[in-house]
Image (cartoon, rainbow, N blue to C red):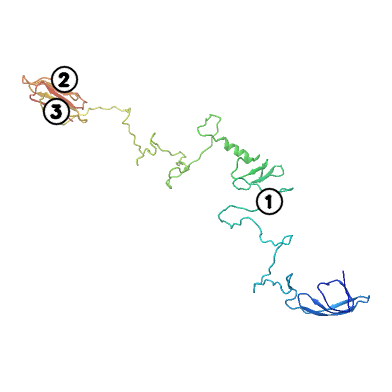
Amino acid sequence: MSNNHTGNVQPSIDLEEHRSKNVHVKGVLEHGYIPGSDQYVPITAIDNGDGTYSMKTSASLSSTDGAIQDGASPSIRATVLDLTSSNPLTAAIVDSSGNQITSFGGGTQYADGAARGTATGTLMMVDDGVNIQSAKGDSAGRLETIIQDGGNSITIDYNGSPISITNAVPIQPPLAGFLPIQETGPALTALQLIDDTILADNAAFTDGTTKVSMAGFIYDEIAGAALTENDAAAARIDSKRAQIGIIEDATTRGRYAAVTAANAIKTDCSAVTQPVSIAATVTAKEIRSSTNTTSSVAGSVSVQTLIASNANRLGGTVYNDSSAVLYIKLGPSASTSDFTALIASNSSGVGGYYEIPFGYTGIVTGVWSSAAGNARCGELT
């Protein structure tokens, strides 16, 4: 590009404006002007030997030379930020129309671990190989991940044995279904054998068909930490591998039979008659009494207690020492119409006598035909 300058004398030209340009000067050019430096420098012409001349000039630059100037006023220059003096370089970002952009970004920024608010912002995008898609999640905001291999199976090596996942399976916590795993090695056989012995509660057991698992117990003769309700623990065996058990009441939990220091267990057989078997000759002898307790009861036409009930009684006697007849009863409320025996009076000088049957320990009552005399009673214990 060429610029023509005509006239006899050109005082100066703008060197920055005519950088790397052909300048046609008619007349005398004295100086060159360096924009932004306020300097005019002398210009020397050099003969290029081809009918053209080059302009040579030189100038010394100060610390302010080469600064960024304001577009309207060259005297306003930007300064560069330095950490010591903190001189910022102010810049503005504009759009394609030249308008300054004053707002950047968008959405809500959170510090790590901060309380969650109403989130706004940009979706996470992924490349599906053809288009850009937004990532997918569930209603709880959890990212959904699909494991797949282009429709083929995925083989996972586990201890040297392959485990094949035959289908693409979406994994979402918690899993809605099962992860299909195809196992053809020894692990599959082991899993099948374990499952064979698992039965539902109260399920039917078939002899010769249903499988069972062996169970082991612990030999432990030293008392350990006491268990509390719903604790799990190993059952015990003795040194001969016999399982140790307890005898518990049929209806009351926690009521156990106790063994004495002499290795005896106490049994209460009072509710049931127990048979006795003796291989030798046994001499039986009845229980005998050596004590007789006597008393006197005055004759009366109202019922009287002659001998009170006594579980330790072995026998008893009643002599009617009265001129009136005595109505005696083995039981309460004797009367002239309800009695066990009638004992004659002693009107002839000898009164009647009665022995209580052996084994009877209840009350004995009596009433007389008239109030006279006494009943002489005896109780053998």
Q: CA distance from mark 1 to mark 2?
A: 116 Å
Would you name the residue on which mark 1 appears? Answer: 125
Q: Quadrant of residue 197?
A: top right
Of residues 169 and 144, the one drawn nearer to the viewer in this rendering: 144
Would you name the residue on which mark 3 appears? Answer: 378
Which amino acid type is shown beneath numbered disc 1?
Met
- Classed neighbour count for the residue bearing mark 3: other residues with Cα under 10 Å, few (<14), some (14–19), many (≥20): many
Q: CA distance from mark 3 to mark 1?
A: 115 Å
Q: Earlier in the sequence, mark 3 or mark 1?
A: 1
Foreground disc of the pair 1, 2: 1
Residue 45 screen position, x and y as percent: 88, 79
Say what secondary structure mark 3 lies in.
strand
Foreground disc of the pair 3, 1: 1
Say what secondary structure mark 1 lies in.
strand
Q: Earlier in the sequence, mark 2 or mark 3?
A: 2
Of residues 165 and 77, the one drawn nearer to the viewer in this rendering: 77
Q: Is residue 342 above or below residue 294?
A: above
Which amino acid type is shown beneath numbered disc 2?
Ala
Q: Is residue 137 above or below residue 78?
A: above
Left or right: where does residue 145 sit relative to residue 371?
right
